[in-house]
Image (spheres, helix red, strand yellow):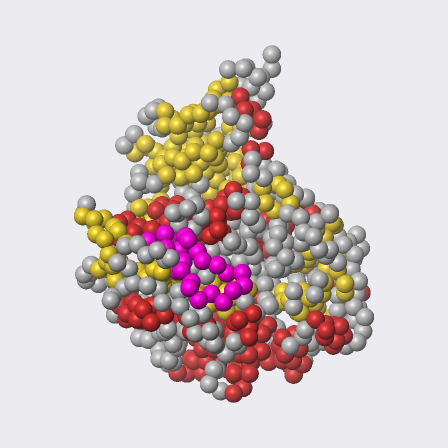
Amino acid sequence: MATTLRLRIHTELDLGEKNLQDPPQVYAKIYKLVPSAGQLKRVRPPREELVPVSGRPKDWTTINLDPGHYFVEAVLPSGEILADDVKLETGRESELTLEGERSPHEWLSWQHLMGDAQTVSTVDRSFSRLRVLRGSQSTQLLSTPHSALVAAAPEAAQAWSLIGETNEDSLPALIGAMNKNKNGIGLSAYMQDAERVVFRVNVDGLQGSGHHNLNKLSTAASRYYIVVSRQHSVELLSLPLPWREIKSHRPVDVEITVQAPGDPREFYTSIGVLDESLGMLIGYLASGAFPSARKLCDAAKDSLFLKTSNPLAAAAGGYALVSTDTDPSDKDWHAWIRNLYQFFPHIPDGAIQWGQHCLRRRRTAKDVEEARKAFKSAFQRGLPFYSLGIRWLLEGLESTSRDDPEGAKMIEAVRRVAWNTCFAQAFTIIRVGSE
Amino acid sequence: MSAIVYEKPVNGPATHAIVIGVGDYPHLPGGGMGQLKSPPYSAHDLARWLIEKYNCPAKPLASVSLLVSAATASPFTFKVNNIESSINVTPAVMPQVKLAVREWRERGHQNTDHVLLFFFCGHGIAAGTDLALLLSDFGEVPTAPLEGAINFGAFLQGMDECKAREQCYFVDACREGSELLIKNYSYRGDPIIQSTGNIPDTNGHSRRLATFFSTLAGAKAYAAPGKPSVFTHALIQALSGLGSTDDDGGPWQVKTTRIQIALEYLMQEASKELKLSQAQFSITGDLAAITLNEVNENEFSVPVTVVCEPEVAISKAYLQCRDSKSKVKKERRPVRKPWCVTLPVGIYDVSAIFKSKAYKDAEIQKSVSPPQRRVVLKTPVAVS
């Protein structure tokens, strides 16, 4: 006789919306433990269920299980492992809450969940306190230029050389060029403390109380960047906007965190999308946990690819799919990657994914030629939205286009940008100038 | 001199490993890099672990190549069937490494089902995705220092033309930013294996590639004398069982996907102990799911941390772990810090007993499985 388990992961999350219908979810493995030779043994394979992650006690997933002893495990994008045991009795509903590590602030909770909040615990871990690393340099948001860099294909291709060749002296010229000589938009912080400052921006979403709707603050642009100053350089953040939640089509905030790292050679900034449906997938992509990202992508495939209401989110799914594809058989989603390439020219990532797909599955020279075309097309489309795109583009061009002069120039341009790209982040962040 | 230190004939799919450790850099051109003590220990320990412990019935270990450069060379020793062997090791200089890597690649090229393991420990210099692994003869030619370096990215690309479809790379090297790579734009070291444009006949199977990188900045400096580096130590723990799972229904198997989870945990723990910040590197580059060795669940232990709720109660608690036969496996007197123990995979009764009567005694049954377990004992304040 089955009984029910109500399962949730508790961690405070500040997603900016108080009335979210569905909280973010991750997969948990549920193992039944059964007696065997005087010991309890795990029944395999485990059951896998999507479990809500939130600070709201009302967010549960209810699972029907046989009575008995169970072991439950989930791994968050930050790498934190949550696990516990629960005993289910006949006719009685049981609850299990897996407790996530506390974030230093609720407003920093999303970055903490993604593993981006720079914290180090004290040596005495008994009281779960966190000591924040202190940085010596100030972090000030200078300007948020809206850019025409990728408004049209010919200009998009110039992004590579413009960014790759900029030095400390020519930074104002870069910002001016990106803004077409208009002033950038100053942003006020959503929240801050002595070490960190968080900004939230969107297109067509909330305005005020620390949220910035860029469409209301400026004339519409095809792409938005944020510039964050360092001592002798800036960090240029490519914002994944516009971003809409794939089920409700609600505009979603992009969160930018600026914090001084423990090592000044590292990057100051990180980007997250406060998307309850796909934020976790992007977190797994950033940490290199591609199989976990793939599982979440599989669960959201229809919303991601068939409706294509958010092609930037579909591109995240594309990375999860292409990076984990080793089976030689043809799949439905192969056509979806080609669609991203063909129908969304303003997103270079689709072309890069199609090129990688063709290259990884190459059987004849035609496949290599198709990959070459896709990579060159991607270059012409401008900076990828995802940092993985920069890596794949560079690898792809090197594999397919080293011997032609045009390809060699592209490789050189992409390499210069790659030297200064933060590959620990899912979205593209580039340091411009020398630090 | 062949770099192979272990070889066993295997019919069919097999595992071939190459292990490189560089501590001796006689030609370093100044700057921040210095001599390293831990890489020779790391390379010896990993190679020894592979020969003595690696157990993959589906793809048994068929060969291990070992190249090590240390300030003071020492022979490589290992035991098989209680027979100890001692072998002089090939130095990790470019001509020898080139030869050994190409032979390793050729062994992999014989069967699409082979698994290839590559391990490097030493200095690394990086610029973006470019990574050069420095061998002992790095800088020997002052006008061309990178002749003694492996262009890791190009090497990985070239290895895609090797038929072996499962390839794992472990790089235990600081990825220090380097002007040298930026200045030598067109040359980032020797790829050793070049991309030729050939398309390997693999029945359409893409390569399953898993790459792991050390993430602790300067961690090697923290390796204890005569011990491997923090990353290699964590890697051996992961391979020994902390990176294993029994999800497939058979024996406990080490898988790359679980290695990633175990290494994330172990490296975070190490950085806390050493008070280092985690560098902004992902621990993985690519992460295809590859099954490696099998482990016996009784032969490795899992780190377990026991805490009380409220936290301060632990300073008064007598703690105990008993196994399924009620045998006391571990116990501890009151101490004002969490109880960190290691226990074999299994189910345990964990209890807190208070002599002071300040808190109520607590007992809970918990299962322990890799890579780690945290147990919270709820010990309410006793009401008098």
Task: Out of A332 and A169, give the one closest to the viewer.
Answer: A169
Residue A186 lies within the magenta run: no
Query: At which x and y percent is residue A218?
Result: 79, 68
Specify start and end residues of the magenta stretch as a single range: B22-44
For the C terminus of chain A, which image quadrant? bottom right
Q: Quadrant of residue A56?
A: top right
Asked whether the viewer can see residue A223, the reply is no
Asked whether the viewer can see residue A129, the reply is yes
Q: How many marks?
A: 0
Residue visible at 60% across and 12% down in the picture: B384
On screen, residue A191 versus residue A413, left or right, reads: right
Residue visible at 27% across and 54% down in the picture: B75
Query: At which x and y percent is residue B69?
Result: 36, 60
Q: Quadrant of residue B342?
A: top left
Task: Out of A348 and B179, give the one closest to the viewer.
Answer: B179
Query: At which x and y percent is residue A276?
Result: 61, 53
Q: Is residue A4 above or below residue A315?
A: above
Task: Out of B133 and A38, give the one closest to the viewer.
Answer: B133
Residue visible at 49% across and 67% down in the picture: B29
Task: Out of B72 and B283, give the one closest to the viewer.
Answer: B72
For the N terminus of chain A, which image quadrant? top left
Query: At which x and y percent is residue A94?
Result: 51, 33
